Amino acid sequence: MAKPILKKVPISEQCPEERIKNFNEVPYGYVPGEAMKEAKRCLQCKNAPCITGCPVEIDIPGFIKAIGDGNFNDSIKILKEKTVLPAVCGRVCPQEEQCEKVCTLAKIGEPVAIGRLERFSSEWEAQQKTTDIPKTPKSTGKRVAVVGSGPAGLTIAGDLAMLGHNVVIFEALHQPGGVLIYGIPEFRLPKAIVEREIEYIKKLGVQIITSFVVGKTKTIEELLKEFDAIFVAAGAGLPWFMNIPGENYNGIYSANEYLTRANLMKAYLFPEWDTPIIKGKRVAIIGGGNVAMDSARTALRLGAEHSMIIYRRSENEMPARLEEIIHAKEEGIEFHFLTLPVQYYADYLGWVNNMECIKMELGEPDSSGRRQPISIKDSNFKIPVDVVIVAIGNSPNPLITTTTPGIEISKKGTIKINEKTGETSKPRVYAGGDVATGAATVILAMGTARIAAKSIHNLLQNK
Amino acid sequence: MNRILKKQVLAPGIKLFNVENKDIAEKVLPGQFVVIRAYEQGERIPLTVADVDKNKKFITLIFQEVGQSTFYFGSLKEGDEISDVAGPLGKPSEIECFGTCVCIGGGIGIAPVYPVIKALKNKGNKVISIIGARTEELLILEKEVKQFSDELYITTDDASYGKEGRVSNELSRLIKEGMKIDRVIAIGPGIMMKTIAEITEPCKIKTIVSLNPIMVDGTGMCGACRVEVGGETKFACVDGPEFDAHLVNFDLLMKRQRMYTIEEKESLGSLEKNKKLFKSK
């Protein structure tokens, strides 16, 4: 056997000086030769630890072998057996925490670049004139309503359509895709790619109704009269604020609003598009997750001279994906660790102009296992700012839970489910994605949808 | 769906659309709003539903052309389809038999107060309406409001119609004349609602206002519409839009409403270029 190659085939990217001036995607992706070379690094382990590391159990050695053999069409077919969103997952999955973390090669060097290869397959498919649409079985006549068209909703819709069920997705916003459309920026996940994946799901026979606010336009109770089962995947849409003095001054956004304006409403194309966004020169982003990185890098592209991440713990505890942190650093995002805002100040017109912070130090580990930040007395200082983006997390939107009698929710506001089946406390109603787990990742949402798809299918077969 | 069944110009720059949407017409209650998007590049615009067809087939929307998106919206014709209408959103008005209710609408605020007037009257209240505008030709819905009001008072800033002055003057007069008022509902510009809250607070008259901050999604997702009520932050789209006027921080509301003044001017600049495009539609 040939000696294993310890390094990933590098991927070419837009250079930082250029990319901070545009919203185009940062990595260019592998060309076929690079992809085949990288695919051949895979040891094709019999026990395939990577598959167990994947929440939707993609046949990873299988699709990689197909790439290595130059059978790109087979590779995308293998991927699509388990995921309807390969172009998305190849870009936004935290591979370093999942499949690549348990890759055998990771023990002696760099793991196989599974994410980049998945992305390559999907790109290759997009470049072909035709997309293979698998044959769906004869209709079962059973109807399933899916609430929300984010990663979980799209996954379950694809799965159930492939089993012959009639699926209708209800989306509250005017465009389907959920967080893939309103949250994740163009430079990380081009919207044309999301639209392409959604077109594929529609071709499987799924109907998507937009501008339909479940809980308002119709309630779950009303939908239960029209559908055999319902899957709720409404996401974690309610933004948290810190409730500190001055947080409602002009120029202070939730990350949800900032990113929704920039991505869904295309405010970066203002005034060609009508929705505006405040283009700050000194922008502070509160938080250390992917949403904070996305906001910071968006602010930079909108012309910020200083785009500053303000995080109360240290770099080691940052929840953001490694690639996002690296990209952010390359682009010149400034990191203020162990720093917590305590108050905002404004000018006489109500515009934020200063942020008072306090220094923190790390104490004992808390319930999350991370060392708890503790404020240092009398360490207060001010940072001048003109835009602030609060990216400290979200909880589920209560629009659905408050209008659905009999559905149990947790203290955090998430819908309680049986993790093995996706069932809620209400018969025929299932849930998955962030509305059930609390804010998590795209792929975890897809994993919960896969589980619920199996139990909904069982329910419908036995009806 | 969302077809414009009827279009009417109520006043210069103020238009009425009857929009076909069965789902919303069946559900909407007084005080609730919809979010519309007229075309792909357009903003999401929150509009209170001004009326509902008795056969529950269409809703009535009344709006003022102020920026690029509303101007384009106003250029649509009967038979056109609005690309997106989502709703009904927000909490409905509290409609009970309170006794004597004074309902106040200022400017375009007459449109959202009208369904509340109608509902309060139908519930058996004595309804005193006060409506006002800058000038006679901008006064809308007089006939409709009159139909559901026991008394109607009209003001214009320039004395071109009704009494000269503001709607708040009429409210002060009624209070001074000793009218026993059980509830005031006021919808209009921030400064008008603030003035009315200041008049009724010392008299301890329960006063409800419908707030109109900037919104994006209208479903509680973004927090653009943060308002301060009783010292707490609320989202007008899901916690309101109606609140107890005596608890609202109106100064903050008005400051936040001006957040995009500069951008609005820039957008209107490009609007001039696009006007031809709208007209050809």
Image: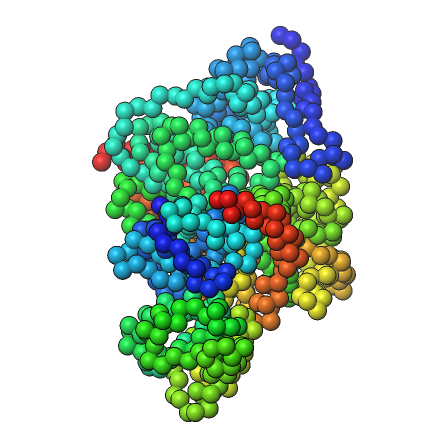
Q: Looking at the figure, which quarter contains the C terminus of chain A?
A: top left
Name the residue nearer the viewer: A56 or A129. A129
B10 shown above or below B131: above
Q: Position of residue B129 (x, y in %)?
A: 40, 77
Question: Residue at (64%, 14%) from the top-left corner?
Answer: A33
B44 shown above or below A43: below
A78 shown above or below A1: below
Total labels drawn: 0
Question: Residue at (34%, 41%) from the top-left corner?
Answer: A145
Q: Looking at the figure, which quarter contains the N terminus of chain A?
A: top right
Residue B87 seen in the current view: yes
Tell me the quarter of the picture where residue B26 sits.
Answer: bottom left
Residue A390 seen in the current view: no
Name the residue nearer the viewer: A177 or B261. B261
In the displayed structure image, the side of residue A98 where residue B11 appears, left or right = left
Q: Position of residue B218 (x, y in %)?
A: 48, 55
Q: Position of residue B116 (x, y in %)?
A: 37, 69
Tell me the quarter of the picture where residue B87 sits.
Answer: bottom left
Question: Residue at (39%, 84%) from the top-left corner?
Answer: B181
Tell me the quarter of the picture where residue B29 sits.
Answer: bottom left
Q: How is the image coloured?
A: rainbow
Q: Position of residue A457 (x, y in %)?
A: 31, 33
Q: Residue furthest left?
A: A463
A295 shown above or below A161: below
Q: Residue furthest top?
A: A1
Name the residue nearer the viewer: A412 or A280. A280
Question: Residue at (56%, 52%) from the top-left corner?
Answer: B68
